[in-house]
Amino acid sequence: MLEIFSRIKLRPKQLIAVVVFVLISCVAQMMIPTLVSTMINDGVSNSNTSLLITLALIMIGLTVLACVMSILGARISASITTKFSADLRRARRTSPRASGSCSRSHGRLSRIRRS
């Protein structure tokens, strides 16, 4: 197992990018309830329409930012997962111990499918 994982190359820049995108998305989503409470406490109670409009626009911007960051994080995460699984399959094929167990399992699957 260690032999297989030693051959897999992880890309640190992509991993850091996913963490940053998810973190920004979470912070943006967590700021929205705070803005809502500010809207109610300061905008609605004081009838401050300009504050309400400003906070509503900020909330829309935060929502768009959170969505974009989530999409980018998911996209990079899918890319990392795809490359990781390809590296894992490649390492499994080149491993000297893998060939025996692989052929046996394929033989069993082919017998099951024919039945």
Image: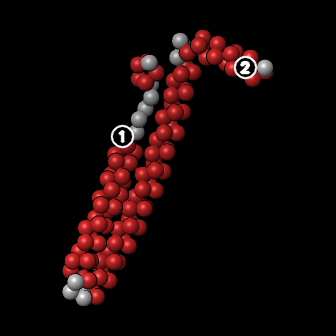
The one nearer the camera, 47 or 25, is 47
| Left or right side of 105 for 51 | left
User: Does the rendering let one see residue 51?
Assistant: no
In front: label 1 or label 2: 2
Give the SS element for disc 1.
Answer: helix
Q: Position of residue 94 (x, y in %)?
A: 55, 19
Q: Residue furthest front?
A: 45
Q: Nearer the N terminus, badge 1 or badge 2?
A: 1
Percent across and percent down for residue 64 are 41, 67
In this rendering, the answer to whether 54 lies above or below 24 is below
Q: How is the image coloured?
A: secondary structure
Check the image and report above or below for 66 versus 52. above
Q: Position of residue 85 (x, y in %)?
A: 52, 33
Q: Is residue 26 above or below residue 114?
A: below
For the residues labelled 1 and 2, the Cα–Cα distance comes to 42 Å
Q: Residue at x 41, y 23 (%)?
A: 6
Kind of residue at disc 1: Pro
Please rate how many residues cluster around mark 1, counting C-alpha atoms within 10 Å: few if below 14, some from 14 to 19, many from 20.
Answer: few
What residue is shown at x 73% (from left), y 19% (from top)? 112
Give the residue at x 35% y 78%. 57
User: Which residue is under mark 2?
Assistant: 112
Q: Mark 2 is on which residue type?
A: Ile
Image mark for residue 12: 1
Q: Quadrant of the C terminus?
A: top right
Q: Quadrant of the N terminus?
A: top left
Mark 1–mark 2 contact, CB under 8 Å? no
Q: Residue at x 29, y 66 (%)?
A: 33
In the image, is residue 85 above or below residue 91?
A: below
For mark 2, does the 10 Å Cα neighbourhood hold few (<14), some (14 to 19), or many (20 or more) residues? few
Q: Is residue 103 left or right of residue 94?
A: right
